[in-house]
């Protein structure tokens, strides 16, 4: 009902309401024509301003490789749960060109599901659709991966073999220097627990050899045309200062001296001040790091199933087994809370609990 002091005022109010209704109808009709591909483009543009660069790159890759090719031509308002479910099934069972003509793993399909659900949730908020069709499409269950427990003997073997390889490498000086740099990278990963993207982003400004610390301030997102793109750390607690043991400090000191020689001898040096870099000072490319790590595993006789990230898990496991409190361990690892640390390393806590039970019982045994 519309009220007004005069007939003319009521008519003006009615005209304004009709104009707004017509505008809304036109807007609604334009939204009716929007396809999944068009909406994903709109959503990605909005997400870019509020999302970490590395996270956004993941959204873009998943959208480009999986969501748009499969669902892109469907109108957003015509998307139904069974269509989404069919996409998940196809990704899990049919050869995928983006995965060397092999089906995707459940964890990859789950990531696709997470991105699609997030985008469609925004479509609901923006009044493109009334409800999220991904709510009732079941994403695949992901079996929890048991974290490989690299024991101290295996970690020492990895380092010892890498050191030996660096000393025995026959060839040009750059190759010998590269072999030594890989060794320092493995040592620092084992003794600091830094993430895969945090290590290659370190600069010498972040390292204080006198105080025996390093500070995590950023993350290496991608290297394109030898130009790095750095991003914010994973979370606020990922910004942290980590103390280093003697082994890591000595390795870094020797590495810095060698790198200074390389810098002075280089004809062209890209001065990013990186702790780990190529012979020209440019950032390390992830593919090359992982390839070098696989080679190091092979020489040490360790399983190829071990991931570079497992060195971080090994550091966490060693902290807890050494009796370091979970709060301190969580802080070193840059976890957003001790709950994450406790959940990830529950197996270690169980072992420690068993040891605690035996030690408590030993007190009674001795008293007999």
Image: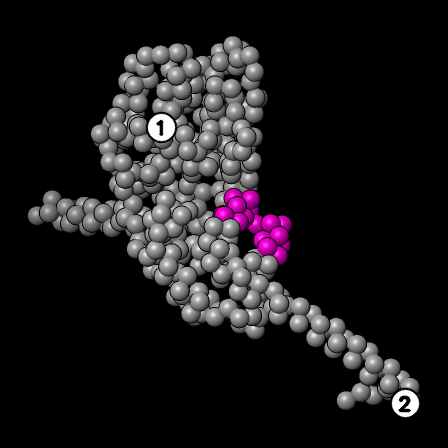
Residue 302 at what x, y percent from top left? 24, 32
Magenta stretch, main secondary structure class:
helix
Residue 98 belongs to the span the image colors magenta: no
- Residue 119 is situated, as x and y percent measured from the top left of the image, at 54, 60
Q: Is 58 colored magenta in this rendering? A: yes
Quadrant for residue 3, please give it. bottom right
Front-most of 60 and 76?
76
Q: Nearer the viewer, residue 357 or 86?
A: 86
Q: In the displayed structure, does residue 354 sit left or right of residue 224?
A: left
Query: Is residue 70 visible from the viewing direction of this image?
Result: yes
Sequence-wise first label, 2 or 1: 2
**Residue 290 in which image quadrant:** top left
**In the rendered view, would you say 343 is above or below 171?**
below
Which residue lies under the disc numbered 1?
292
Q: Magenta residues, as a range?
A: 41-61
Residue 111 position within the rendered picture, expressed as x and y whole percent measured from the top left? 43, 54
Query: Which residue is drawn at the image coordinates 71% and 72% (left, top)?
Result: 26
> Which residue is pictured at 44% across the width and 55% down the height?
112
Task: Label 2, secondary structure: give it.
Answer: helix
Q: Residue at x 57, y 21 (%)?
A: 271
Q: Residue at x 42, y 47 (%)?
A: 98
**Residue position for label 2:** 7
Q: Which mark is residue 350?
A: none
Q: Residue 100, relative to residue 286: is it above or below?
A: below
Quick one: quadrant of the N terminus?
bottom right
Q: Are marks 2 and 1 in contact (CB under 8 Å)?
A: no
């Amino acid at each position: 009902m519309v009220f007004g002091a005069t007939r003319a005022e009521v008519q003006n109010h009615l005209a304004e309401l009709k104009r707004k209704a017509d505008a809304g109808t036109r807007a609604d009709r334009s939204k009716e024509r929007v396809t999944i591909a068009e909406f994903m483009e709109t959503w990605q543009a909005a997400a870019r301003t509020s999302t970490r660069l590395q996270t956004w790159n993941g959204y873009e890759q998943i959208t480009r490789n999986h969501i748009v090719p499969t669902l892109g031509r469907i109108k957003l308002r015509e998307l139904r749960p069974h269509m989404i479910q069919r996409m998940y099934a196809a990704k899990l069972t049919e050869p995928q060109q983006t995965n060397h003509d092999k089906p995707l793993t459940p964890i990859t399909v789950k990531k696709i599901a997470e991105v699609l659900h997030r985008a469609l949730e925004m479509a609901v908020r923006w009044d493109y659709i009334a409800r999220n069709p991904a709510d009732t499409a079941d994403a695949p269950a992901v079996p929890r991966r048991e974290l490989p427990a690299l024991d101290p003997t295996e970690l020492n073997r990895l380092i010892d073999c890498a050191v030996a390889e660096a000393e025995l490498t026959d060839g040009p000086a750059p190759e010998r220097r590269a072999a030594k740099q890989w060794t320092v990278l493995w040592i620092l990963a084992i003794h600091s627990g830094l993430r895969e993207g945090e290590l290659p982003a370190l600069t010498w400004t972040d390292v204080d050899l006198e105080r025996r610390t390093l500070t995590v301030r950023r993350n290496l997102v991608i290297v394109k045309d030898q130009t790095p793109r750095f991003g914010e750390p994973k979370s606020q607690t990922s910004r942290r200062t980590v103390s280093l043991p003697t082994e890591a400090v000595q390795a870094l000191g020797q590495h810095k001296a060698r790198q200074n020689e390389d810098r002075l001898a280089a004809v062209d040096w890209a001065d990013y001040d990186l702790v780990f870099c190529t012979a020209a000072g440019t950032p390390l490319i992830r593919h090359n790091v992982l390839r070098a790590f696989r080679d190091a595993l092979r020489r040490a006789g360790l399983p190829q199933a071990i991931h570079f990230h497992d060195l971080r898990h090994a550091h966490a496991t060693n902290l807890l087994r050494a009796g370091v409190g979970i709060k301190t361990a969580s802080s070193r690892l840059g976890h957003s809370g001790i709950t994450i640390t406790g959940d990830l390393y529950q197996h270690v806590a169980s072992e420690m609990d068993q040891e605690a039970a035996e030690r408590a019982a030993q007190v009674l045994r001795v008293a007999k």
